[in-house]
Amino acid sequence: MDTARRGFLLGKKNTLPARRPPWSLVEEEFTRQCTRCGDCIAQCPVRILSIGDGGFPTVSFADAGCTLCGDCARACSSGAIAMADGGRPWPWTATIDARCLAREGVVCRSCSEACETGAIRFKPQPGGVSLPHLDASRCTGCGACLAPCPGGAITLQERPIAEPEVST
């Protein structure tokens, strides 16, 4: 049974699909292949993985972001987490909403300081506080920007998978 249906039957509202470790297979394949052994959880150096609904590993960015070290994928013997060469670790990217303190005129750059890829930068504004700019093409979805944001303005959103370019 999928997590959304399970949440509905348990009376939970607005149940979102669980966030899986980086490089996990799509949800249906992941839950079919994952043996729930916990090896990925044990190997995570930043402790963002834990046992979730149904005993499957889930990711939480409440305290830290993912370093994308690949230890979880290397520990996964079932193939439910499989690092592909050049493959994106997750299908989401960060978004910054109106709760951003900089957008309220308060100097804050916590998110950009935590972003190792430089996906979040602050652009100077004439006569005002610099505002955040997110370069989605550089965002890995690692979640490092979530915990340090004092306004809770950053979320991770599913991004559409880009269609491959066709050469003519």
Image: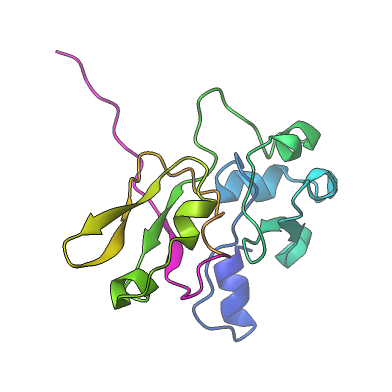
Instruction: Name the outermost residue toward the front.
Output: 127
- Magenta stretch containing residue 154, yes or no? yes
- Magenta stretch containing residue 40, yes or no? no
Instruction: Name the outermost residue toward the top.
Output: 168
Instruction: Name the outermost residue toward the bottom.
Output: 11
User: Which residue is more in the foreground, 94 or 151?
Assistant: 151
Residue depicted at x 54% and y 74%: 15
Which colouring convention does the figure follow? rainbow
Q: What range of the chain is rendered magenta?
A: 148-168
Quadrant housing residue 99? bottom left
State the quadrant of the C terminus. top left
Q: Is residue 101 left or right of residue 115?
A: left
User: Which residue is more in the foreground, 33 or 149?
Assistant: 149
- The location of residue 28, given as percent across then percent down, is 58, 49
Q: Is residue 62 left or right of residue 45?
A: left
Residue depicted at x 85% and y 48%: 42
| Up/down of 151 relative to 131, above or below | below
Q: Is residue 98 left or right of residue 61?
A: left
Residue depicted at x 40% and y 45%: 119
User: Which residue is more in the foreground, 15 or 112?
Assistant: 112
Q: Can residue 128 be seen?
A: yes
Quadrant housing residue 26? top right
- The location of residue 56, given as percent across then percent down, is 74, 56
| Up/down of 79 relative to 128, above or below | above
Q: Can residue 100 be seen?
A: no
- The location of residue 160, given as percent across then percent down, is 34, 47
- The location of residue 58, given as percent across then percent down, is 68, 58
Q: Is residue 48 left or right of residue 140?
A: right
Residue depicted at x 75% and y 36%: 71
| Up/down of 105 relative to 166, above or below | below
Name the magenta segment's main secondary structure. Answer: loop
